[in-house]
Image: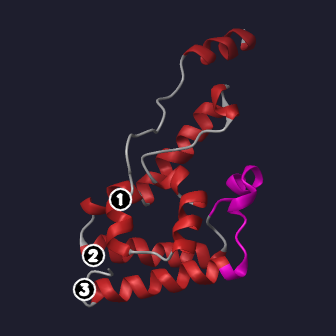
Amino acid sequence: MLLLVFVALQFYRPEKNTSQGNHASVFIAETNPPKSVKTILTETCYDCHSNNTAYPWYNNVAPFSYWLSDHVNEGKEHLNFSDWDNYSIKQIDHKLEELIEEVSKGEMPLNSYKWMHKSARLSQQQIDSIVSWAEQTRILYQLGKQPI
């Protein structure tokens, strides 16, 4: 019976989180991260915090596909770089505050993501650069200035 359920799950997969075009263009244009920070965000954050996930091969196998889908959906609930233009200034301030806190504590990226993505294992220098950029960007938003 368990084998039947496993086989059936292979045919009913969750919807993939993919989009066409530059899904984070508003976020990038508005916050203007340095190239090094932009690279880190692209390689370590966008899979779970944007509308476009680069799926690993094992996403084609249930139950991993369901597990990944849940992670992506939960990540986007907290922060979605692709929806940046839909956030109020107050929400942006809170998102940046959480980003600073989670990255500083080593809570993000998740350990389960780092296990499979070596580039997501951030050095202290990378953490410091993300936090510094996010703090500066947050201040600009608080002052009512666009970070560009």
Q: Determine which of the numbered discs, if any, sits on residue 25 in the image.
A: 1
Name the residue: 38% across, 51% down: 22
Residue 112 % position (x, y): 71, 52
On the image, the x and y values in percent for residue 96 come to 42, 75
Q: Is residue 137 above or below residue 66?
A: below
- Check residue 113 for magenta coloring: yes
Residue at image x 61%, y 66%? 108
Q: Residue at x 68, y 25 (%)?
A: 61
What are the residue bounds of the magenta stretch? Answer: 109-125
Disc 1 versus disc 2: distance between alpha carbons?
A: 20 Å
Tell me how many marks there are. 3
Query: Which residue position holds label 2?
Result: 90
Closer to the N terminus: mark 2 or mark 3? 2
- On the image, the x and y values in percent for residue 36 come to 57, 73
Query: In the picture shown, does residue 125 fall above or below 3?
Result: below
Element at badge 2? helix
Tell me which amino acid carries mark 2: Lys
Q: Are marks 1 and 2 in contact (CB under 8 Å)?
A: no
Disc 3 from disc 1: Cα separation? 19 Å
Classify 10 Å Cα crowding around label 1: few (below 14), some (14-19), many (20 and above): some
Q: Secondary structure at mark 3?
A: loop
Q: Left or right: 2 with respect to 37? A: right
The amino acid type, in three-letter code, at marker 3 is Lys
Q: Which residue is mark 3?
A: 145
Q: Of 83 and 26, which appears nearest the observer?
A: 26
Q: Quadrant of the C terminus?
A: bottom left
Density class for disc 2 (Cα within 10 Å; few <14, some 14-19, many ≥20) is few
**In this image, 144 relative to 128: left or right?**
left
Main secondary structure along the magenta-highlighted residues: helix
